[in-house]
Image (cartoon, rainbow, N blue to C red):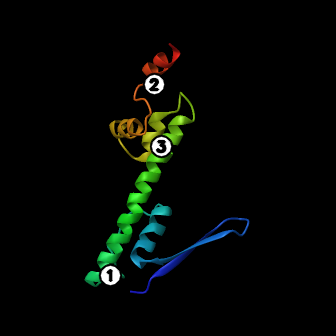
Amino acid sequence: MKKLYAEIGDADGNKDTVFDITPDLANAFIDALRNVVGVEAPTRATSFDDLTATIAQTSRVIQHLEVFRELAIVAADQTSPHADRKAITIAAAMPPSRLYRVLEKHGRPRDRKTADRTTEK
């Protein structure tokens, strides 16, 4: 299986390059960024080894992005004592109960009213 590379640049000409991306993951990543509806099964990886390599690389990306999403959620919640948690749950595509578990995991109060009262004393 021939692996791909990706270049990501900004308007100032700065570029970052990533090599050895499995083709099916590259296609799925591009589709996800473009918000393409409908996910397709791998088409380029056909052998067991190619498919397991694609699965492994996809799993590493998912794990990294899950942690990144949690940190972004916490950062959004920290922007204001009145940060819109409903908007955060919508952006994160998760139910409020999961949002609160993520916030608690990172030391954020579930109930900001109670937390405000305890810090005022």
Q: What residue is shown at x 37% (from left), y 44% (from top)?
A: 94
Q: What's the distance in space between the residues labelled 2 and 3, CA to CA? A: 15 Å
Q: What residue is shown at x 38% (from left), y 86% (from top)?
A: 1
**Front-most of residues 13 and 36:** 13
Helix, strand, or loop for circle 1?
helix
Q: Which mark is residue 4?
A: none
- Give the residue type that dot 1 points to: Asp
Q: What residue is shown at x 28% (from left), y 85% (from top)?
A: 47
Q: x, y (%) of residue 75?
A: 53, 41
Count of labels shown? 3
Q: Which mark is residue 73?
A: 3
- Give the residue type that dot 3 points to: Ile
The residue most toward the top is 121
Above or below — where is 69 with respect to 11?
Answer: above
Q: What residue is shown at x 50% (from left), y 46% (from top)?
A: 72
Q: x, y (%) of residue 119?
A: 50, 19
Task: Answer with mark 1 or mark 2, whichever residue precedes in sequence.
Answer: 1
Above or below — where is 112 with respect to 106?
Answer: above
Locate residue 103: give its quadrant: top left
Q: x, y (%) of residue 42?
A: 33, 76
- Give the residue type that dot 2 points to: Arg
Above or below — where is 5 with respect to 79?
Answer: below
Q: Are marks 2 and 3 in contact (CB under 8 Å)?
A: no
Helix, strand, or loop for circle 2?
helix
Q: What's the distance in space between the residues labelled 1 and 3, CA to CA? A: 34 Å
**Front-most of residues 66 and 45:** 66
Q: What's the distance in space between the residues labelled 1 and 2, CA to CA? A: 48 Å
Q: Which mark is residue 50?
A: 1
Q: Which residue is mark 2?
A: 112
